[in-house]
Every structure is written in structure tokens, then in C-alpha cells.
């Protein structure tokens, strides 16, 4: 069995898997066609879809991180619908835990004003993350503070955008510092409309802080419709007023914030890495093997037909 991730090595891995004649499971968790127009030339989108189709049709099974991404691949006819399966998410609920809440970290994230409402965002600072949306929020929330944890190509531009505002850029954090950063905020806001995995949303919820996220990509899989207002909130992408209507009560009502944060933490305790891995191994790998065997049987069927006619089985006459 070969699990292939969508990086440059994919072509080499694909060739090796074919030479070894083993089933191939491929994951799709970076929505490259969506990012291309933001970083390079729009005309590259169609050729990229061609490459994606070539790779995933060569695989026996494709794992996707969300129902939305699965729908996108089906709409683009990347591969057969029954060969696209959901890859269950997992979160390290011990590393991301409310117990890591830290007054010292909150001082750092709020630039010395820990009593002020604190919005936290963790992740790669890229233009595709729609982080400029947060500027509009902060314009409407002058009493709040915001902390960006992470780094990326959009950081310099983002720092200029938030110049003169109560915003802190920590750069990359890891280990216990990252755990503290999550747990020490009041609300985690996720404006990205192209998020496929949403691991940072899982980690924030596991850390016991409420999430307000765009109703797009993989985020609705984490906060489904029946859990909205219970374990977190979703807003219509790009709708500032809708986001503010969900965000303000959380920032200024401590009891509501604690209730949603606790419910989010309880929900994340169900997302166990062992359970997610067990499903991949026992169900999805078995499905890949079945598709692989079926493909081989179809491929060798003409050869079997010829062999039977060239070398017919001897007739046995039993009396």
C-alpha cells in the first residue's frame, strides 16, 4: 500500500508504486486551483486541474479532508465519486488543552493589556487566508485586541495594514508556547474561505476557546449546522456584520464564552488520532485494495480469455 501526498515527490512516488504493483491511496488537502489566481496566472488553473485529474485517476482511492472538497473534486470529475472518501480529522487533545491558559502569554498577546477582549488567529499568513477581513472587524471593535500567531509571505503587508492598531504579531510558535497562545485568547476567528483541513480550528476548540469561522471549505465539517451556537459559530463568507453579530457576544459575555468553550472542548475529545488512523487502515485501505484488485482483474481479462483459448483446459471424462 502506498499513501501519496500532493507535493512534487508525488510523480516519483506514483512511478515507484506502479512499478511495485501496489495499491495507491492519494490525499488531496491543498486546494491548489483556488490558490493559483492569488499567487500567479489565472490561465494556469485549467492545466492544474489536468495534472490533478491525471494523478488521482492513477490512484485507487482519494482521501479528502472535508465534504466540501469532495464535492469540488466530483464537480471537476477528478476521479470516480465512489473513489473519494472523507479522511477523518484528529487533534492532540493533550497538547491543546485549557490548562495551558497563561497570564504571561496573555500579556504578550495583548501587548500588556490582558483585561481587554482578545481575538487570536493561528496559522500561515498567506493572502489566500482572507486575513484582511480581520482589519474590518477590528475597525468595529476598538476596545478589542488581536494576536496573529504564525508567519508567511503576507506578514509584511499585514503588519502595514494593521499599523497603529492594537495588533501583535508573534511569528512562529511551537510546543508549549503554541498551546499557551491558543488557550490564552478569548475567541479564535478563522476568516479563510479556502481552508481544507481546519486543523487550527480543531486545536483552538480543543484549547477551550470559542471559534467564529467562515462558512466555507472544511470548517462546516467541524462545526456542523446542528452544532452552531453550541460548539462554535459560522458566518457567511465576507459578511462583516454577520461575523460581528457572532463575535461581539463572545467577546463581552464571559459566561457565554466559557459555555461555548467548554462545549467545544468536550466535542474535540471525540476527535482521537487513534480512531481516525484506525478508520483509514481498516476501512479506506481495504477499499483501495478492492478497487486495485478490480482494476487488475479488468486489465487481465483479455489475456485470460486468450490464454483459455490457446491453452484450453483438458476435458476429463468421468464414468
Image (tube, rainbow, N blue to C red):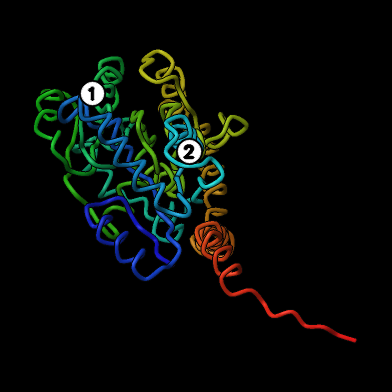
Question: Which residue in the rendered view is the most extreme toward the right?
Answer: 319
User: Which quarter of the figure has residue 129?
Assistant: top left
- Asked if residue 184 lies left or right of residue 277, the reply is left
Mark 1, Cα crowd under 10 Å, few <14 / some 14-19 / many 20+, is some
Q: Which residue is mark 2?
A: 70
In percent of the image, x 30 and y 50: which residue is there? Answer: 6
Q: Quadrant of residue 69?
A: top left
Question: Left or right: where does residue 229 sit relative to residue 142?
Answer: right
Question: Residue sitting at 32 percent across and 59 percent down?
Answer: 14
Which circle marks residue 211 in the picture?
A: none
Residue 197: x and y, percent? 40, 43
Can I make out residue 227 in this image? yes
Q: In the picture, which quadrant includes the C terminus?
A: bottom right
Discs 1/2, front:
2
**Residue at disc 1, secondary structure:** loop
Above or below for 19 versus 67: below
Q: Circle 1 sits on which residue?
A: 132
Please tell me in which quadrant of the rendered image residue 294 appears.
bottom right
Residue 189 at what x, y percent from top left?
Answer: 36, 32
- Is residue 272 shown to the viewer in this render? no
Residue closer to the observer: 11 or 302: 302
Question: Is disc 2 placed on a helix, strand or loop?
Answer: helix
In the rendering, at what x and y percent does residue 118 appear?
Answer: 32, 33
Q: Earlier in the sequence, mark 1 or mark 2?
A: 2
Identify which residue, 163 or 284, lies in the foreground: 284
As measured in the structure, the alpha-carbon distance from the residue carrying label 1 to the one carrying label 2 is: 28 Å
Amino acid at each position: 500500500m502506498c499513501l501519496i501526498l500532493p507535493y512534487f515527490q508525488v510523480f516519483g512516488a506514483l512511478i515507484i508504486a506502479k512499478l511495485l504493483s501496489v495499491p495507491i491511496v492519494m490525499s488531496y488537502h491543498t486546494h491548489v486551483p483556488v490558490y493559483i489566481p492569488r499567487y500567479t496566472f489565472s490561465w494556469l488553473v485549467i492545466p492544474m486541474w489536468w495534472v490533478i485529474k491525471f494523478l488521482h485517476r492513477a490512484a485507487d482511492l482519494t482521501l479528502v479532508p472535508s465534504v466540501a472538497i469532495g464535492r469540488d473534486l466530483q464537480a471537476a470529475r477528478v476521479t470516480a465519486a465512489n473513489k473519494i472518501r472523507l479522511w477523518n480529522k484528529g487533534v492532540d487533545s493533550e497538547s491543546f488543552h485549557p490548562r495551558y491558559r497563561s497570564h504571561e502569554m496573555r500579556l504578550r498577546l495583548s501587548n500588556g493589556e490582558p483585561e481587554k477582549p482578545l481575538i487570536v488567529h493561528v496559522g500561515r499568513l498567506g493572502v489566500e487566508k482572507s486575513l484582511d477581513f480581520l482589519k474590518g472587524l477590528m475597525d468595529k471593535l476598538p476596545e478589542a485586541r488581536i494576536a496573529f500567531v504564525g508567519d508567511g509571505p503576507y506578514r509584511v503587508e499585514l503588519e502595514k495594514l494593521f499599523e497603529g492598531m492594537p495588533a501583535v504579531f508573534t511569528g512562529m510558535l511551537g510546543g508549549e508556547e503554541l498551546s499557551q497562545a491558543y488557550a490564552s485568547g478569548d475567541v479564535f476567528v478563522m476568516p479563510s474561505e479556502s481552508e481544507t483541513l481546519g486543523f487550527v480550528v480543531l486545536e483552538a476548540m480543543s484549547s477551550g476557546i470559542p471559534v467564529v469561522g467562515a462558512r466555507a471549505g472544511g470548517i462546516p465539517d467541524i462545526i456542523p449546522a446542528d452544532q452552531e451556537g453550541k460548539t462554535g459559530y459560522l458566518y457567511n463568507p465576507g459578511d462583516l456584520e454577520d461575523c460581528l453579530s457572532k463575535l461581539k457576544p463572545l467577546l463581552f459575555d464571559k459566561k457565554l464564552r466559557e459555555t461555548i468553550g467548554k462545549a467545544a472542548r468536550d466535542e474535540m475529545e471525540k476527535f482521537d488520532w487513534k480512531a481516525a488512523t484506525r478508520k483509514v487502515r481498516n476501512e479506506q485501505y481495504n477499499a483501495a485494495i478492492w478497487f486495485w484488485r478490480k482494476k487488475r482483474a479488468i486489465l487481465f481479462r483479455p489475456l485470460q480469455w486468450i490464454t483459455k483459448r490457446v491453452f484450453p483446459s483438458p476435458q476429463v471424462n468421468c464414468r
